[in-house]
Amino acid sequence: MASGGGGNSGCGRDPEPDPPTSSMLGIRPAFVEVLEDDGPVVGRYLYTEVVMMWNLTKINKYLSTNEQCVAFAEENELVHSQKQCRTHRVPMKIAKSANKSFGSWCCSKESCKGKTKVPRNKGTFFENIKMDLVHLFYLLYAYSQKWSYYTAIHEDPYKENRQQCISRATINDWYNYCRETIVIYQRDKIQILAKIGGPGKIVQINESRFGKRKYNRGRLIEGNWVIGMIEDKSGDLRLEVCSDNIQSAEVLVPLIQKHVEIGTTIHINFWKVYDCLSQHGYIHKKVNQSDPDHPCVAEDGAYLYESLWRRNNIKYKKDPFMELIIAIKYVYK
Ligand SMILES: [Zn+2]
């Protein structure tokens, strides 16, 4: 699963010196700014909220041993705490095994033991994990905080012990698994919200596709279109997935009508729908995607969902780390 394994490439072999920022997220900087420019959302309870949230000190304290990580995973139902042998209908025991992170389930009946032995992380988010759980939970935290690869490597509390940095390949793999999890979670949880736009407001409409999924759970269709409708200034975002040819008016107009108020100025680059939008009460403006003033393009639709998830965490004052844990629990239940 994690092709980078436990961090095979040391710091010295890592040639890129600069922190990857939004470009690594496949989003042009201005797009990120649009999404993040949400005005002040912090209230007077900020202090309590921040103290309650997971931070690196808390990670180092409560998720710094394999036992702590296993207990945390059990508590949050990321792995099962109990399992019955299908044959004997008796509770199975947990045996330490080569898979040292969670051990394996095995039946307490001697005759059954060998046959039913199954790694405890099979079918979970942690399947085929090739690194220690403490390192993985650290990476989950890093992802939840939107840390760049550079920051994740730099802040890594275990690099001294390992005498090695986590490789970029490993970080990339696990960030991708996290992102895929977030997309599925966010897509299922998305609710019909109030429409965006309105007279005098601009909504940018852009399309991207779901890129190649490394760890396809069968719920994300590679190549499906993701349509992002983003209100200028507020950065309010609406997303739709569709498999059809979205550049046709038949497909696109109903989606716009579902999410965007009549009278909105729409910036869109599809020439085919350009003409018919005015018939539906919108003011259209064709934009060139290479125009630096209209840069709202994500290379992979997954990043749009990630942006929406991050935005909602800030807006609703959620702890990103726990939100990620909740998403993992939901997707791998
Ligand atoms: Zn059995």
Image: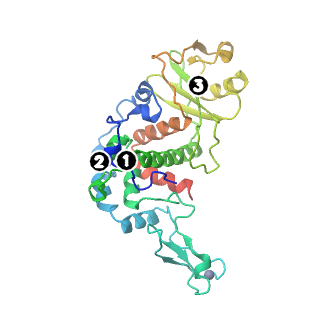
Q: Work out whether mark 3 precedes mark 1 in sequence or the reverse, and give the earlier one.
A: 1
- Spatial separation of the CA atoms under disc 3 and disc 1: 35 Å
- Spatial separation of the CA atoms under disc 1 and disc 2: 9 Å
Residue type at the position of mark 1? Ala
Q: How crowded is mark 2: few (under 14 residues within 10 Å), some or many (20 or more)?
A: some
User: What residue occupies the far bottom of the structure in this picture?
Assistant: 110
Callout 3: helix, strand or loop?
Answer: loop
Residue on which the image places disc 3: 260
Residue 217: percent from the left, percent from the top?
61, 51
Residue 145: percent from the left, percent from the top?
37, 44
- Spatial separation of the CA atoms under disc 2 and disc 3: 42 Å
Residue type at the position of mark 3? Val
Residue 43: percent from the left, percent from the top?
32, 39
218 or 39: nearer the viewer:
218
Task: Tell me if label 1 and label 2 are in contact, CB under 8 Å.
Answer: yes
Task: Tell me if label 2 and label 3 are in contact, CB under 8 Å.
Answer: no
The residue positioned 57% from the left and 25% from the top of the image is 206
**Count of marks placed on residues:** 3
Which mark is nearer the camera, 2 or 3? 2
Residue on which the image places disc 2: 155
